[in-house]
Image (cartoon, rainbow, N blue to C red):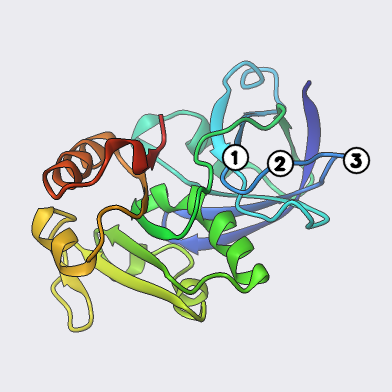
């Protein structure tokens, strides 16, 4: 079933990431970590659907997506930049991508953190953030999505990794075997992974070498 929803607000998050706040259809529900297919409610774009994860919580009275734009792709994410409050998007019913299974470590690259935003927000509301870790990789400090919110989450351990900048207080480089070994002391815990495909492949390989059970690694398929 599809729903046409108007845009209530558009807010800048980073230089190439925006937050879209939308009307919420009556009775619409989802689980933190789930996504839906989204298209722009304009003739040339209605059939161009793309998957985006809900970054709001199910009990909010609005819907929210946090979306990175890719100008070089000349596609849906770039067309979203031309929209204004009052324009509409078309969304489908929610479907599962990354489901929370239990305490563990979230490993994200760039906009790959978006499936974890609602999950971590939900854990914070429930008072169950303690024992969770977020390893968040970006090119630069300015690219970090929702940094202030993540840093303020009491009980959440955060490891920021920057590939293009070497700054105090940040890991420098990529999420590789050595970095994972420094920050994770139990590879039998639940592990959640989302990011660019080359990163996911490299991290899954490193986790396997470190003894993680492939069945304990939840990733975006």
Residue at horizontal 23%, vertical 82%?
A: 169
Which residue is label 1 attached to? Answer: 34
Picture coordinates of residue 49 (x, y %)? Answer: 58, 23
Identify the secondary structure beneath mark 2: loop
* Residue at numbered disc 2: 30
Q: Are marks 2 and 1 in contact (CB under 8 Å)?
A: yes
Crowding around mark 1 (Cα neighbors within 10 Å: few <14, some 14 to 19, many 20+) is many
Query: What residue is rendered at 18% in x and 55% in y?
Result: 175
Camera-near label (1 vs 3) is 1
The front one of 209 and 111 is 209
Residue 99, visible in the rendered structure:
yes
- Pointer 1 or 3: first along the chain: 3
Which residue is label 3 attached to? 26
- Report whether 185 appears left or right of 83: left
- Label 3, secondary structure: give it: loop
Distance between the Cα atoms at labels 1 and 3? Answer: 18 Å
């Amino acid at each position: 079933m599809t729903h046409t929803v108007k845009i209530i607000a558009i807010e800048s998050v980073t230089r190439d990431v925006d937050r879209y706040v939308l009307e919420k259809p009556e009775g619409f529900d989802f689980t933190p970590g789930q996504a839906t297919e989204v298209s722009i409610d304009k003739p040339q774009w209605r059939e161009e659907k793309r998957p985006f994860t809900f970054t709001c919580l199910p009990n909010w009275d609005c819907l929210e997506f946090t979306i990175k734009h890719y100008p070089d792709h000349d596609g849906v994410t770039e067309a979203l930049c031309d929209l204004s409050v009052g324009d509409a998007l078309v969304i489908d019913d929610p479907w599962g991508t990354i489901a929370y299974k239990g305490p563990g470590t979230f490993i994200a690259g760039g906009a790959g953190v978006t499936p974890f935003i609602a999950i971590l927000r939900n854990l914070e509301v429930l008072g169950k953030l303690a024992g969770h870790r977020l390893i968040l990789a970006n090119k630069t400090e300015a690219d970090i999505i929702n940094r202030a919110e993540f840093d303020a989450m009491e009980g959440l351990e955060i490891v920021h990794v920057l590939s293009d900048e070497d700054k105090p207080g940040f890991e420098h480089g990529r999420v590789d075997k050595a970095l994972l070994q420094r920050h994770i002391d139990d590879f039998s815990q639940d592990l959640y992974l989302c990011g660019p495909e080359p990163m996911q492949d490299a991290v899954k390989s490193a986790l396997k070498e470190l003894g993680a059970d492939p069945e304990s690694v939840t990733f975006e398929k």
